[in-house]
Image (cartoon, coloured by chain):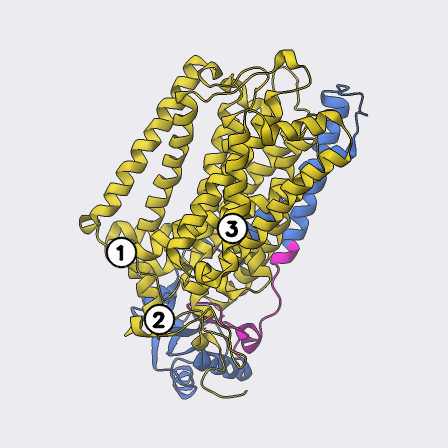
Amino acid sequence: MTMETTASLNTTLEPVDRRAPLVLGNETFASVTNTVCAPAEIPLKRTPLVWYVCLAISLAMLSLLGVSVGWLFWEGVGIWGNNSPVYWAWDITNFVFWVGIGHAGTLISAVLFLFRQKWRTSINRFAEAMTIFAVMCALIFPGIHVGRVWTAYWLMPIPNQMSAWPNFRSPLLWDVFAVSTYATVSALFWYTGLLPDLATLRDRAKSTVAKVAYGIFSLGWRGSNRHWQNYEKAYQILAGLSTPLVLSVHTIVSFDFATSQLPGWHTTIFPPYFVAGAIFSGFAMVINLMIIARWIFKLENLVTIRHFENMAKIILLTGSLVGYAYGMEFFIAWYSGNPYETFAFQNRAFGPYAWAYWTMISCNVISPQLFWFKKIRTNLWALFIISVFVNIGMWFERFVIIVTSLHRDFLPSSWAYFRPTFWDVATFVGSWGLFFTMFCLFVRFLPMVAISEVKSVMPEADPHYGHGKH
Amino acid sequence: MTTKSPYFGALAEFDSAAAIFHACEKVRDKGFRKWDAHTPFPVHGLDRAMGLGSSKVPWIVLVLALLGGTGGFALQAWTSTEGYAMVISNKPLLSWQAFMPVTFELSVLLGAFGAVFGMWGVNRLPQWYHSVFRSQRFAKVTDDKFFISIESADPKFNPEATQAFLREIGATHVELLEH
């Protein structure tokens, strides 16, 4: 009954006289609950084999992370390819890459919420989960790249026997506060959104373990309207706090570079350019993960082509902003008349790392331009492939910014070429293992779609539904 | 001295958002004070239909965000001028401009704590036991059913009359709940 309606209804068009529905296929409140809860309610014994396969691969990659980090702690950062003058390489590239991925989740959950973009309701839970897992991956890299990891706590203002305090004038310290605040607030925001849905799982749970576990985490939620009132206010405020927060996080990440005096880093365009790039890559990642999850867990009625088309439009916009920023960097390099700046950019495009630069340009500037065509925006295969390209391109963007700016600095005598070692690659692959492991657990045990929020955008949720004009 | 009622109160079940909205207006107009509506999602306009005042959460957030901001600035100012006064790049010890990012982040962090834990506080959460959970039918409140509970502690509560009233305003099922 549901599938025919889905196929025949094109929700990417907005009729003049009414809004296109966000939920397809004559879903009712109860059927939404059933659809979303189904994956979490499969008894343990009947867990699909494909999930175990995914989890096994993820755990194998995760153990690679464990080995890489263990070896790093034992042997030191010398196991990486970092050299003089390329003191930052894959470690910080991966850090910026993962933080950036997270930004789309916050954009969907907070910014689109404040703008009353109701289509966000069926993808926000998923995107927020992605944010948290991506930030977890990101936090690893600055933590382990410090060399003497046992002194990593010096990053925090903790009273100590040396009577020493961190230098609050350093953007690297601002970054510690920005990213840890971001991780904490994202987790709180996510958990607050989950609260009513955990209560749904509690009320439906068959096994005692599930009932107790969901029961504890749902805090005794009883759908009270006196609670909903405070809950909605808290949620709205969290969205309001997260919006400037997410902008500040990548701004401060860009300050790590922009406040230094290195040509190629020392530019005022960095904050907006980094934020646009972060949203760009994050949306691409949401599309990739969502296409897979929607297919495996049959969420076609809740996550419609319209959701994908909207995300593709955001990718087109932010991709064009990123392309503009690349062009503007070159213009300023020439217009400034500064020979070091000019050299840095000529070297970027035509020097030893030209291959990385043009990979970045092809993936980030050229591929999203295909989203001008509606046929491509609404084709899942095309969306998936272009989104993979965008993610590759955005990883290379950070690599290009960090490594090509560093490898040829002011003194030609100190120039060098960076090559990653096995352990560079292993640590990065391992961080994907962490990301995928968390995702496997998330899709298996938690509601992937915000059940109560989706219900609230259905026509029956209106207190005047079926009564005509009130 | 009043004797404690053996009942927690009455629980009435409704089928739709529209039904509970109108029922709430009637319960409010009847003058009940100790009662609540339970819904699977926040029903638009139900706060007004119930006659609720405004939420205290924003005030908690404001206080905590200000505390985070001033505390964060004070931490940086003290450590940079007294705790560990080091001249770096010939910048003044109290370079307040450089302290803004951390001041901002800590305002947001404490504000978010205020929003989440303040919401728990005013809602008295976590509260794992509540008398409404005694009802078998109440499990549907997180699915597709809507409920009104009127407590026996309300001066207007009367086991028989209140149940009859709830049926009259459209409840599909009414029951008395023990504590």
- The alpha-carbon separation of the residues under discs 1 and 2 comes to 25 Å
Left or right, residue A245 beside residue B76: left
Q: Amino acid at mark 1?
A: Glu
Callout 3: chain: A
- Per the image, label 3 sits on a secondary structure element best described as helix
Residue at x 36%, y 47% (from the top left corner): A442
**Number of other residues with Cα within 10 Å of mark 2, as a class: few under 14, some 14 to 19, many 20 or more:** some
B38 part of magenta stretch? yes
> Label 2: chain?
A
Residue A155 in the image, given as x and y percentages of width and height: 59, 25
Label 1 belongs to which residue? A41
Q: Amino acid at mark 3?
A: Pro
Residue type at tag 2 = Thr
| Residue highlighted by disc 3 | A368
B7 or A450, which is in the foreground? Answer: A450
Q: In the image, what residue occupies the spot 23% across and 47% down?
A: A50
Crowdedness near tag 1: few (<14), some (14–19) or many (≥20) residues, C-alpha within 10 Å: many
Which hue is chain A drawn in? yellow
B132 relative to B68 in the view: left or right: left
Q: Which residue was labeled with disc 2?
A: A6
Question: Which badge, 1 or 3, comes first in the chain's sequence?
Answer: 1
